[in-house]
Amino acid sequence: MLAMEEQIGTGKTIRAATAHVCEQFGMGRATVERMRAKVRDASRANWLPLLAGNYDKCGRPRIEMSEEAWIYCLSTLKEGGKRYPLKAAYRVTESAATVCNWAWPSYAVVRKRWEELPAGEKALIKSGPQALDKTIPPMTRTVAHLSAMAIVNLDGRQADFFVRWEDGTVSRPIVIAIQDVYSRLMLGWKFSKTEDSDTTKAVILDVTDRYGLFDKLLTDNGRAFASKKISGGATYRFRGKKPVDTEDEVKGILTLLGVNVGFAKPRHGQSKPIERGFRDVAESIDTLPEFKGAHCGHRPDAKPEDFTGKPVDIADARAIYDRELRDHNERTGRRTEMGKGKLSLQEVFDRSFRHRIPKRLTAAQRAFFMSDMTLLKPNKDTGALSSKGFTWWSAEHQDILLQHRHGKVTVLFDPNERSKPVMVLDRDGNLLIDALPCLERGRFDSTEDARQYERGKAQVKRGHRQSLKGRHLMSRAEIAAIKKRVDAEKPAQASPKVDTNITGAVFGAAPPKPKATPTKVTPVRSGMSGDDMNSALNRALDNYQNMKRAG
């Protein structure tokens, strides 16, 4: 273009200058003319960016597609679900485009437009919100700042084989286990028919007896783990649509012992390392030759061909699990963060645990741990605590119970025998009564039980009467004398004084009659003429009539 401007400056025509430039640079005439059309009306400083190639818009132009048709296709694909193919949505939209006069290109063009959409939008359209999480890389977690028994996680898993229990029933057992987060060591486990809180408490107690109390427990929202017996008083347990109302529930055992209870996100195995440990257990233990015939697979379509349904005795299953879990903990070369491909889970745990001061449970705390608890409201008159036909009360503790009659107290009892004495705590976990006895039930047709009750009742009443007698209360005469002195010392009651002279209005009375206006009467003078006399009489008559009408 600079050469062409130079030729034009020498006096050549545009046609001659174009021919000279085409011969000089070996370019076509049409190309040179297109270039000159770009820079003809622009400043010379802008020629270079104007002549540079625009590679953002290379290739063929985009084929026309109706926006309504594209939205209809995406909506159909979203309603179809995860397995609904794009080809089917294309055919449905093609039929609708014929009726609605939409511009709808070939399937190859639609497929290309679909691939151009962001990965997150495609995941939402095809699979919903949960699939959107898979398009974002998970958070990488580290345990280097922790130590052994700082955080443990608890979970349950249904084993993939059948066992015969002590009572002769056959079912797949539930494995409830606790794992140390720092070392990934399996600390303790138990078999259970169902995922219940009693077995969960037993597993926690075994771990605390061996290693001491842990600092924090991480679990999911299962009924056994998020029950009030275990974690009552925790702020949120991922159960229900609303947060847990901690004001009207009993505090759980771990909460009262000072353990921080946390809850992992439901259906999110990345926040619970024990899920990975359970997968190793399922692959290495449940498929052992000892469980041949009883192994049923994890899913109905994964049942092995050699499955016979013959169960394994529960004692043998426990022995196999004890052996294999110990091997699981002591196997070297673990590729965990702290194992680094060399150490075993047990070695990682031991190296950190030797620097920890164990928190052992006292005998009272251990008995407290094995108790069940509930919230009860003392009777407003007697202070007695009643639940499921049992009543706990004693005369010496009546006053303590009545102090809490407007609220509720926490009662800890033996779940196997409610007739034993119970422990009573206030809502904050402070001990009120160490052992509150249970009142015995009387037989309906037993007169001896009735007599015994009356004797006990009379004894309690006698004690209260004697206690009251020791206070030396005043007689009626002494009370009357004091009242007389009080009345005599009282000042005389003064009459009320009115500080204003305004009186109240009287409503409902007849209004007063208006006073008549006095009318001046002109006296009749003597010597008047007849006309004057008549005029004076008429005026007097008129005045009389006016006075009469006025009252």
Image (cartoon, rainbow, N blue to C red):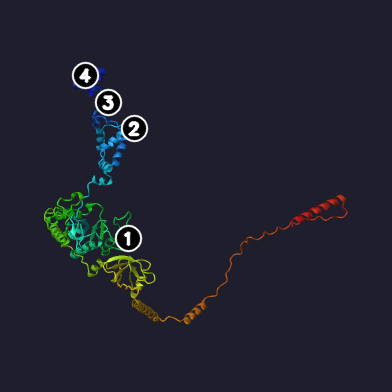
Viewer-closest of 157 and 10: 157
Using the rendered image of the protein, determine whether residue 379 is visible from the camera's viewpoint.
yes
Is residue 337 among the parts visible in the rendering?
Answer: no
Residue found 32% across the figure and 58% down from its top: 244
The residue beneath circle 2 is 99
Q: Quadrant of residue 210?
A: bottom left
- Residue position marked by numbered label 1 in the rendering: 246
Image coordinates of residue 173 in percent, x first then y, are: 20, 58
Looking at the rendered structure, the kind of residue marked 1 is Thr
Tell me which amino acid carries mark 4.
Answer: His
Q: Which residue is mark 3?
A: 38
Q: Sequence order check: which comes first, mark 3 or mark 4?
A: 4
Q: Secondary structure at mark 4?
A: helix
The quarter holding residue 160 reads bottom left
Mark 2 crowd level (few <14, some 14–19, many ≥20, 10 Å Cα): few
From the top left corner, tell me how far across and down residue 260 is, in percent: 25, 60
Q: CA distance from mark 3 to mark 4?
A: 19 Å
Asked whether the residues under the numbered discs 3 and 4 touch, taking CB atoms below 8 Å apart as contact, a structural biologist would say no
Disc 4 target residue: 20
**Front position in the image: 37 or 175:** 175
Q: Is 343 rendered above or below residue 427? A: above
**Residue 157 left/right relative to 532:** left
Q: Is residue 480 left or right of residue 100?
A: right
Q: Earlier in the sequence, mark 2 or mark 3?
A: 3
Closer to the camera: disc 1 or disc 4? 1
Q: Are marks 1 and 4 in contact (CB under 8 Å)?
A: no
Q: Position of residue 434 (x, y in %)?
A: 29, 72
